[in-house]
Amino acid sequence: MRLDLSFYQKDAITLAQDLLGKLLVREINGQKIISKIVEVEAYMGPEDKGAHTYNNRRTERTEVMFWRAGHAYIYIIYGMYYCLNVVAAEEGIPQGVLIRGIEPIEGLDIIKINRPIKSRKIQDLTNGPGKLCQALDIDINLRGTDLVYGQDLYILDHQETFETIASKRINIDYAEEYRDKLWRFYIKNNIFVSK
DNA sequence: GGCCCGATTTGCT
DNA sequence: GCAAATCGGGCCA
C-alpha cells in the first residue's frame, strides 16, 4: 500500500527512520523499478547548518523544501550528479530526508541499463545518493514530483524487522556544531549502505 | 558578469 | 589515499 500524506507530515529525523525498509517505486513508461530504502539522512531546516535551507534560505533550488510534505526535492551536486530527498514536516518548514542507499528488489535489468559500471559488485549500482538517482533515471525533471499523489515516483509501506544504526552525516564538515549530529540512519549489515 | 564551491563519484597512484 | 571531473547555485559587485 502506498504511504499517504500523514506518513510524511513529521519532523525529518523521525521520517528518516520511518523511511528505512520502505519500498521506493520508480515508474518509467509503465515499467517499475522497486527498491528498498536502506540509508537516509535528515536535514532539519532553518537551524541546521548542514542543510541547504539553513536560515530559511529560499531560492529557486530550495523552493520545494518549503512545500507540503511528500514532494521530491532534487538538486544537482558537483555539476554532474543528482540527489533525491523527501520533503518532511509541515508546509513552510524546510525539512527533508536525503535518500543515500537503496537495495534493488525488482527491475534490476533496467537499473543496469541506466547505470552501466565496470564494477561487478551489485551494491555499486545503488550505494550512494548520486548512484541511485542515475540507476532510477531520476534527474532535475522530477524536481517537485508528488510522492503522495503522483505516478512517476512513490513509496510503498513494507513491514520488516531490522536493526537501525545512527551515525554522523556524510560530507558536511562545514556544518559546525551540526556536523556531529547523529542524523544518518541505515539498516545494519545491509550491503547497499554507502561507504 | 565573475568567482567560489559543493548533502559525489570515479579512476589513477 | 587522493585529486580530477564539471557546472549550476548563491552571492557580491
Image (cartoon, coloured by chain):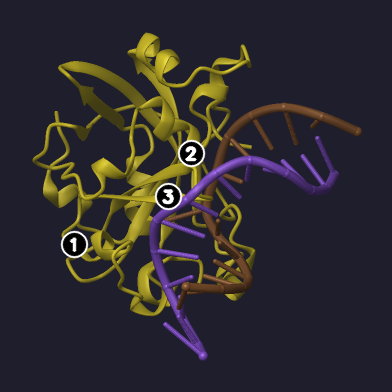
Chain colours: A yellow, B brown, C purple
Pointer 2 residue: A130
The amino acid sitting under disc 3 is Ile
Pointer 1 residue: A67
Q: Percent from the top left, x then y, of residue A47?
A: 42, 77
Give the number of the disc on residue A76.
3
Tag count? 3
Relative to A103, is A87 above or below? below
- Which of A79/A131 is in front? A79
Q: Do the residues labelled 3 and 2 touch (CB within 8 Å)?
A: no
The quarter of the displayed image where residue C6 is located: top right
**Horizontal arrangement in the rendering, residue A109 relative to residue A185 (left or right):** left
The amino acid sitting under disc 2 is Gly
Write down the chain letter for disc 3: A
Q: Nearer the viewer's eye, disc 1 or disc 2?
A: 2
Q: Earlier in the sequence, mark 3 or mark 2?
A: 3
Write down the chain letter for disc 1: A
Q: Is mark 3 on a helix, strand or loop?
A: strand
Q: Nearer the viewer's eye, disc 3 or disc 1?
A: 3
Q: Percent from the top left, x then y, of residue A135?
A: 41, 25
Residue at position x 41%, y 61% from top? A43
**Horizontal arrangement in the rendering, residue A147 relative to residue B6 (left or right):** left
Mark 3 on the same chain as mark 2: yes
Q: Nearer the viewer's eye, disc 3 or disc 2?
A: 3
Q: Percent from the top left, x then y, of residue B11?
A: 72, 27
Residue at position x 61%, y 11% from top? A120
